[in-house]
Image (tube, rainbow, N blue to C red):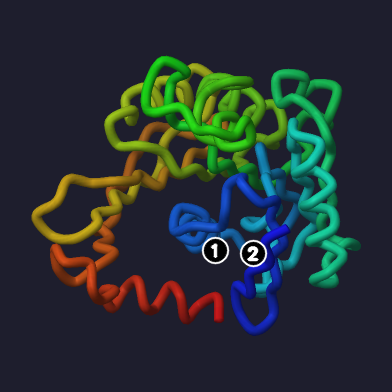
Amino acid sequence: MKTTRINRELILEEPEGGIYFGTDALLLAHFISSWRGGVGVDLGTGSGVIPLLLLSGGLKGMLTGIEIQELYCSNANRNAVINGFSDRFSVINGDIKDIKNLFASGGADAVFSNPPYLKTTSGKRSNTEQRNIAYHEVFCDINDICFAAAWCLRTGGRFYTVYRPERMAGLLSAMRNNRLEPKRIKLVFPSAGKPPSLILAEAKKDAREGLLFEPNLYIYTDGNHSEYSDEMKSIYREFE
């Protein structure tokens, strides 16, 4: 296991050769932080880093992770114990396409996911199956994610995700096809003058039309990527 101290409060164990804590998880946790409590579900929780970031940041709620890989399911449950959150965060080993047998319909106030963003025919294949499952749509695609989110959410509940900008049209279509109305979008750029690398999106179940584009986020101050922007520094401080 690889052990990473995320901040003063949070220690994360992650399987060697798998996926590791990165910027996309941190940005999604920050994006979700406007939701301050209730019942939440993390679809494809991996090592459980997003729920653990939220709880260590003061979220008041009960969180459930759903993870298809048994190794990561046990890993996330162990991380919950290590960090003292096992009474508020637990993980189910299951396939989100079987969501009707995993979680009660309408039982969640918020659902979030850092989903696979590459088609199985796109991008370079990893030399580990764990990475392939995390990055490629091996077991689910964005429509499966949105269907599961809509099933879990109560009317008016919120869905949060991070995705690739070049696939934004598919994301918005999947949201609307599953009664999730896009409400908030934020584009993330490596630095000024570069194309966006991530999209953060929030949708509301059974809501009326109305979409807000938030100000862009620039991770670095320049193209050399030598220094974080003030906003990025602020996000890191939020989870210290």
Image vertical order of residue 56 relative to residue 123, above or below: below
Cα–Cα span, label 2 and label 1: 7 Å
Residue 141 placed where, x, y %?
Answer: 53, 21
Query: Mark 1: which amino acid?
Result: Ser
Give SS at disc 1.
loop
Badge 1: residue crowd in 10 Å (few <14, some 14–19, many ≥20): some
237 or 6: nearer the viewer: 6
Of marks 2 and 1, which one's residue comes earlier in the chain?
Answer: 1
Say whether residue 204 is left or right of residue 152.
Answer: left
Marker disc for residue 54: 2
Where on the picture, by quarter, is residue 240? bottom right
Residue behind mark 1? 33
Q: Residue 122 at x, y = what percent? A: 37, 21
Total numbered badges shown on the rendered structure: 2
The residue lying at 43 percent from left, 72 percent from top is: 235
Above or below 68: residue 170: above
Q: Quadrant of the N terminus?
A: bottom right
Q: Which secondary structure lies at badge 2?
A: helix
Crowd band around label 2 with a 10 angstrom C-alpha radius: few (<14), some (14–19), many (20+): many
Q: Which mark is residue 150?
A: none
User: Outermost residue, right direction?
Assistant: 87
| Quadrant hosting residue 94 | top right
Q: Is 57 on the left or on the right of 197, as rendered?
A: right
Give, as a three-letter code, the residue at label 2: Leu
Residue visible at 32% across and 24% down in the picture: 169
Q: Residue at x 79, y 38 (%)?
A: 107
Work out whether 2 lies above or below 131: below
Report if the CB atoms under discs 2 and 1 are less than 8 Å apart.
yes
Left/right placement of residue 15 relative to residue 233 reads right
